Image: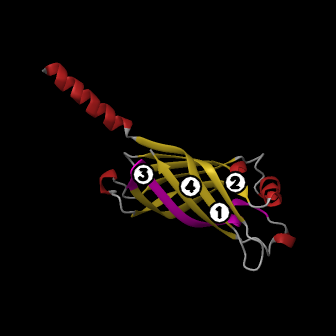
Amino acid sequence: MKKIILIILFFIVNSTFAQKELMTTQGRINFEASVPLFEEVNATNETAKCVLNTKNGELKTVVRMKDFRFKLSLMENHFNENYLETDRYPLATLKGKIQGFNWNIIGTTAKEFKMKGKLEIHGKSKEITTTLYLKKIENGLEIISDFTVNIHDFNIKIPQMLSMKIAEKVNIKTLFVVQ
């Protein structure tokens, strides 16, 4: 009888610790820097990595900048070679803490949380606060965010002749399903 109880306790403790971190390597990040009356400046990356610590609400994301895909290959080339210099700055990261995070209050309806953290793009870091929407789904936890960054905060330079065609404030939308 003692052996059975010990085995059950072992599995309970083991499953509790196993749920400490949830992650994905197939997160989606979309950014939009379009200006009305000009060509759409929009790209998507579907290989972003995200790790959520379910004990303390720490969230870490890493995205390889060369994995952003544009409709036009010329835009993609300019993005990688001229603006974001992805050979020199290959990754963007976001490390933050979800305020008031509690695994037990998240259900199947999206719940709003604030997250404070540090966003690093193009070798520059900036403290940000954003809203996250979390909800449990069949195969994990869905994390959605939508926020805006200013390109000047990250020392991203747009040539004068193109500055009218690319927004200074870039909208970033993320979708992660961590398991």
Please tell me which residue lies in front, 44 or 171: 44
In the image, taking residue 65 as reference, residue 50 lies left or right, namely left
| Residue marked by disc 1 | 31
Return the mark for residue 118.
4
CB under 8 Å between callouts 1 and 2?
A: yes
Check disc 3 and give the amino acid type. Answer: Leu
Q: How far apart are marks 4 and 1 (CA)?
A: 18 Å
Residue 33 percent across, percent down from the top left: 70, 68
Q: Quadrant of the C terminus?
A: top left
* Amino acid type at image mark 2: Phe
Q: Is mark 4 on a helix, strand or loop?
A: strand
Task: Measure the C-alpha gap from mark 1 to mark 2.
Answer: 9 Å
Question: In the drawing, does residue 48 fall left or right of residue 143?
Answer: right
Residue 7 screen position, x and y as percent = 23, 24
- Crowding at dot 1, Cα within 10 Å, few <14 / some 14-19 / many 20+, comes out as some
Residue at figure coordinates x 45%, y 55% from the top left: 142
Name the residue that disc number 3 marks: 141
- Residue 162 in which image quadrant: bottom right
Q: Residue at (56%, 55%) from the top-left corner?
A: 118
Indicate which disc, 2 or 4, sits on the residue closer to the N terminus: 2
Residue segment shown in magenta: 136-157
- The CA distance from mark 2 to mark 4 is 21 Å
Label located before the other in sequence (3 or 2): 2
Res 68 label: 2
Q: Which amino acid does label 4 sit on?
A: Lys
Q: Which residue is drawn at 56% across and 58% down?
A: 174
Do the residues under discs 3 and 2 have CB atoms within 8 angstroms? no
